[in-house]
Image (tube, rainbow, N blue to C red):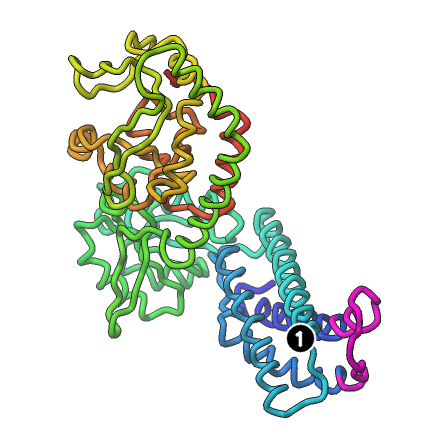
Amino acid sequence: MKRSSQPLILWFMLWDLVLTGTAWVLAYVVRFHAGWIPILHEQPDFALCLADLPLVLILAAAAYHFTGMYTVHRLRRFREELISVLKGTTLLVLLIVATVFWRHHPYESRIVMALFYGLTLGFVLTARRLSWTAIRFLRQLGYNQTPALIVGTGRVARRIAKALGNASWTGVYPLGFVEDQPNRWASDLNILGRTEDLPQLIEKHRVGHVFIALPLNRYHEARRVFDILSQTLVDVRLVVDAPNMAALSLTTTQIDGVTVLGLRESPHYGLNVVVKRAMDIVLSLLALIILSPVMIVIAILIKLTSPGPIFYRQERCSLNGKRFQMLKFRSMRVDAEAQSGPVWCQENDPRRTPLGAFLRRTSLDELPQLINVLKGDMSLVGPRPERPVFIQQFKKTIPNYMIRHCVKAGITGWAQIHGWRGNTSLRKRIEYDLYYITHWNPWLDLRILFMTAIKGWTDKHAY
């Protein structure tokens, strides 16, 4: 394998076309010869399927190219691969359907198109994952490696050096630092020279990548470094030094040719919001149906064991700081905050009723929040909602605290299943909440719900 990505692109293109052609033929065989799907109309001749194969492959090459399936680089993630393959196969099927209608071709079958789409998507994704797995395995063994230079020696430079060392699957390993102010250096990697030495260092060590990792107060030097690197053919990447400003994942946007860096953008938008809301409605409704006998028993016991209402309503904040009345089974006396005012519940809190102590230890007092989820005030999974009076305190003392309000509050969350609930470290809780917000996907929600169902009902901090 060469350092250049061209052989890899040709490898992917070859297998993409071979598997697309295979899927085209196999879709016909499954539809008309496997006997799994009834044939209600006249069966088209197999020769028509074969005659269209060259056109399918030409359209496939065009569709795959235009949707970025051959944008191959060492830092490419599976999510990027998945999206590009999904776009490519979708565009291919649309082009084939449009061509069939335009030509008034006798070989047309909606079932064949659906089978072809599914088979192509599955074949191409599987082949690519197997290829990348093999390549990354070889890179971890030391093959197909390329050295990288890091401009700077500060905190951000050391972080990218450590990150490259941990991500051995990329095949990019840090060779050393380049620094004009060596008094800033503190690392186990050597300083190989100054910025004006970059062209010579790149040629001498056959460097493939340069990471400009200067601190924010030295960004004015980045332009000079880039001008020096313009004499070379090396890949250049700018490592953004914005750890204290950016609480969510960074994004880039082009506005009339101007690159804008997004420091606080949530992934919860567009189709993601629809998917999450659909999951909330279906799963909360199902949970209410299944748990309704338990909730009825709890309601009766509350009424029999202590005076006062069954439910306790408390003002909390959710998405965009919007206030709502959160429901819980009442676990304390009616006058619990008459003298103390709003305070956090403590271990062995004397304000709890005997039944309330049990409900809080088992988190059963949270079950009425399924109604809040169904109403849209909350989500099943998300940062726990807080009272407005505490939010006013925490937002002044806890960095990035308000970021947690860019999504709906949840009954359970990433922080809760890791033990950060009750009277525990707020900073650690925010750290876990921000991880959830940044890395959200439907599978993460399902994982959290599964872990909550298995071990999330009781906790030493549930009181």
Looking at the rendering, in which quadrant would you find the C terminus?
top left
Residue 403 x, y percent position in the rendering:
27, 42
Near mark 1 (Cα within 10 A), the count class, few <14, some 14-19 or many ≥20, is: few
Q: Residue at x 68, y 65 (%)?
A: 119
Front residue of this view, candidates 354 and 232: 354
Above or below, comparing residue 161 to residue 17 in the picture: above
Looking at the rendering, in which quadrant would you find the N terminus?
bottom right
Residue 38 part of the magenta segment:
yes
Residue 77 x, y percent position in the rendering:
49, 55
Residue 460 x, y percent position in the rendering:
42, 15
| SS class, disc 1 | helix
On screen, residue 310 versus residue 226, left or right, reads right
Front residue of this view, candidates 299 and 220: 299
- Find residue 125 and report its image quarter: bottom right
Residue 187 x, y percent position in the rendering:
34, 38
Count of numbered circles on the image: 1
On screen, residue 427 versus residue 130, left or right, reads left
Q: Residue at x 20, y 33 (%)?
A: 388
On screen, residue 27 versus residue 83, left or right, reads right
Front residue of this view, candidates 187 and 235: 235
Residue 272 part of the magenta segment:
no
Q: Residue at x 34, y 64 (%)?
A: 199
Q: Residue at x 65, y 81 (%)?
A: 56
Residue linked to disc 1: 110
Residue numbers of the magenta segment: 27-48
Front residue of this view, candidates 53 and 193: 53
Q: Amino acid at mark 1?
A: Arg
Above or below, comparing residue 270 to residue 244 in the picture: below
The answer to whether residue 320 is seen in the rendering is yes
- Find residue 203 and report its image quarter: bottom left
Above or below, comparing residue 175 to residue 65 in the picture: above
